[in-house]
Image: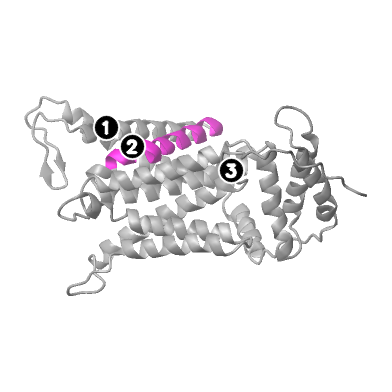
Amino acid sequence: MTTTVPDAPAVVRARGGPVPRDDAARNVRLVAVAFGVTVVVTRLYLALTGYPQIGGGEYHLAHALWGGLLLMLGGLTALVWSNRWVPTATAVLVGAGSGLFVDEVGKFITRRNDYFTPLAAPIIYAVLLGVLGVALLARRARLDRPRALAFSVAVRSRYLADGPLRPDDRAALLADLDALEEDRTGAGARPDLVAYARALRPVIAAAPVAEPDHRGRPVVAALRRAETRLVPRWLHRLVVVAGALALGLVSLVGLVVLLALYSSDPDVSIVLDDQVVPRGSRPVMLVVASAGEAVVGLLLLAAAVALLLGRDRVGVRLCRVGLIVALAGVNVALGYLDAELVVVAVVLELALLVVADRYRHRFLLTPP
C-alpha cells in the first residue's frame, strides 16, 4: 500500500501551546510520593539520630545540597536518555531531590537559619499539595486533540527500539492512530498527521509483542491469595472500623481544644508545645487546626458507625472524605503548631486511607 503525503503548506506557522504527556499524571504522582516519603524519612532519621551534621568543624553538608544533586541528576537523566524507564527514574530523582531541598525551607526563610521555624512544615505540606494538584490537572488534560495524539504516538513508538512492544502499548498506539486518521475535517484538521498515522500503522501492526517480564508477579499473586485466605471481609472491615475509631477519637481532641479556647472557665488552660496559651487569646492556626480536627473526628466516627451497621459504601465514603480533609487541609495548620506531630498524623492517615481503599476495591468495586 502506498501512502501519499500531502504537500507542505506554503507558510509554516508555529503551533504554540504545551502538549501534555499521556503518562503525565502517573509521573507527577510518583514525584509526590517520592517527595513525601523523602521528607518523612529524613525528619524521622534526624529526630532519631539527634540531628547530626555531616562535615563537622567549619563546614556543614546540609541535605539541601544532596537534594540539589538529585535534582540535577533527574534533569540530566531526562535530557540524556530516551528509554522506557527514564520518566520513572526522573520522577523519583526529582521527588526525592525536591524533598531534601524543601525540607530545609526553614533555614532559607529565617535570618537565624531556623530549621524548626513553625512556618516550615506548612510550606513543605503546601508544596506537596501543589504537586498533587498538578497531578490532578494532568489527569484531566485533554489528550484527544491531533497534536496530543501525535506526541503520544511519537513517544510510544520509540519503545520499538527497546524490543517487543507491550500489549497495552500496542493497543494504545493503535487507538491513537485510529483517532488521528479520523481527524480529517474541521478547523483543526491536520492532513500531515493523518498521513503520518497511515504510514505508521503497518509498522505498529507488524511489531512483535511480548508480555513484560514481571518478576514480582508471583509474589503479588501469592500476597493476594494470602490476603483472601487470611483477611476475609469481616476482618478487613474490623480493621477499617478500628482505625477510624482510633483516629476519630484522637481527632476529637480538637473539639475539646476548641471548646477550651472559647471557654470562660478560669480553671481551663491549654498547653501547646510546653507553653501555656495566654488566657483569652485564640491563635488563628490553633482555632483552624482544632476546628478541622473536630470535623475529621466526627466524620471518622460516623464512618465507623456506618461500617458497624453494615452500610459499607457510606462508611468507606465517610472515612475517605474525613482522611482527605485531614490530609489536604487540616494538616497544613497542624504542621504550623507541631511539625513532628503532623508527620505521625500523615503516616497514620495515609495508612488508614490505603486500608479503606483496599476494602473498597476488594468488596465494593469488584463484582461478586
CA gap between label 3 and label 1 equals 37 Å
Considering the numbered disc 1 on the image, is that residue within a helix, a strand or a loop?
helix
Closer to the camera in the image, 212 or 342 = 212
Residue 250 visible: no
Dominant secondary structure of the residues highlighted in magenta in the image? helix
In this picture, residue 196 sits left or right of residue 272: right
Image marks 2 and 1: residues in contact by CB distance under 8 Å:
yes
Query: Which dot marks residue 330?
Result: 2
Residue 188 on the magenta segment: no
CA gap between label 3 and label 2 equals 31 Å
Q: Residue type at mark 3: give it.
A: Pro
| Residue 323 found in image quarter | top left
**Span colored in magenta:** 311-334
Give the residue number, with chain letter if any, for mark 3: 20
Residue at 76% in and 39% down: 180
Q: Residue type at mark 1: give it.
A: Val
User: Which is nearer the N-term, disc 3 or disc 1?
Assistant: 3
In this picture, residue 268 sits left or right of residue 18: left
Residue 55 percent across, percent down from the top left: 24, 74
Look at discs 3 and 1 and give the one toward the viewer.
3
Considering the numbered disc 3 on the image, is that residue within a helix, a strand or a loop?
loop
Considering the numbered disc 2 on the image, is that residue within a helix, a strand or a loop?
helix
Give the residue number, with chain letter if any, for mark 1: 288
